Amino acid sequence: MINAPHFYIKYYGYAMTKEIQDNLYHYTDHAGLFGILENNCLWATHYKFLNDDTELTAAKEKLKNSLLKSDSKLNKEYKDLFSKNNYEVFDNYYNKFEEKEFYITSLCKSPTGKGIAKQHIAENGLLSQWRGYSDNGGFAIEFKEKELMEFITKEYELEKNNQKSIIFLSRVVYSDEDYSKKFKESINTIIEEINGKTNIEKLRQSWIKCIASYKSVGFKEENEFRIISYLDKTSKKIRQFRGKNGDIPYIEFFKDACSNSGINLPIERIIVGPHKDKEARAAHLRVKLAIMGRDIPVTISKTPFIGR
């Protein structure tokens, strides 16, 4: 189990330190599932259009306080600057990042450990996620984390000539956890760079990690991992889909990486969510997968949720 967020792109000086064997789940609807299968891509949504109205702002006070702690190694000049005028200097610095183009793909990790309830969730999906698709039913796409990381590395390689684009996988830290402890490595990097080192890339990636991987404890049941992409100038096309309240901007992950390498997304399994026609949905999905030449196991959630 990973105990804190990590950057995994070796280009930035971070590497996987242990064998990763956890599974991650991406919940989606019928149209989303077949879009993923047919186009070999995941969508990443602009952060301002996600279901949390504190995205990128929830961590502001936590990060500020961590930098200004009495035992912080941030030099006195910057402590004074960040403390004066109601933190105006810090706010301006923070807003430079908040105003940028962040796109996020959300995944959930099953709870670890023993117990019937945890095993049920791992096999059948999260009820809170199924409730979100109660009108038309949903699907959970299961990925092996290690294999997904390999695709994230491929994705980064396609953008590596753009020094201002960053993509990484991170575990979300929730507001009931010790912020300074969970983000200790990134906070120390921020302090080192602010104190005089010139590696703006390390500063940028650590700052992004601290603000984009933090959410309210109200979302903790999701046990979220997220693929976070920070785009400045990029070759990616900003697309839009129609949401309930208007057009929502998104980008596509992995489509070019799959096309260039001639391989498919590393999908381990697809869970058909609770629905009155779940058996028929599973049968239809198995036929479609056979036609596509995809050998992906399909299971049906045993959670007896009826929905509305």
Image (spheres, rainbow, N blue to C red):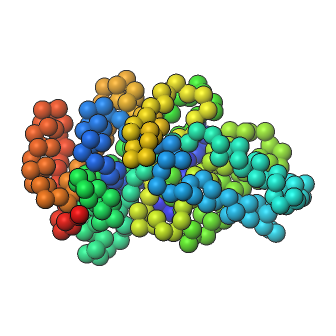
Spot the residue most to the bottom. 115
Q: Is residue 155 above or below residue 202?
A: above
Q: In the rendered image, which quarter contains the C terminus?
A: bottom left
Nearer-the-camera pick, 290 or 39: 39
Q: Position of residue 296 (x, y in %)?
A: 19, 44
Q: Tell me where residue 185 sits by quadrant.
A: bottom right
* Residue drawn at x 26%, y 41% as measured from the top left: 31
Residue 124 horizontal side relative to residue 203, left or right: left
Spot the residue most to the front. 245
Residue 258 horizontal side relative to residue 18, left or right: left
Can see residue 123?
Answer: no
Can see residue 93?
Answer: yes
Residue 122 horizontal side relative to residue 167, left or right: left
Q: In the rendered image, which quarter contains the N terminus?
A: bottom left
Q: Tell me where residue 264 sits by quadrant.
A: top left
Q: Position of residue 194 (x, y in %)?
A: 80, 48
Q: Is residue 15 above or below residue 254?
A: below
Q: Position of residue 221 (x, y in %)?
A: 41, 67
Nearer-the-camera pick, 187 or 128: 128
Q: Is residue 174 above or below residue 230?
A: below
Q: Position of residue 145 (x, y in %)?
A: 38, 50
Q: Tell me where residue 100 sits by quadrant.
A: top right
* Residue drawn at x 49%, y 28% as measured from the top left: 236
* Residue drawn at x 65%, y 42% as measured from the top left: 99
* Residue drawn at x 72%, y 50% as measured from the top left: 94
Give the number of marks. Answer: 0
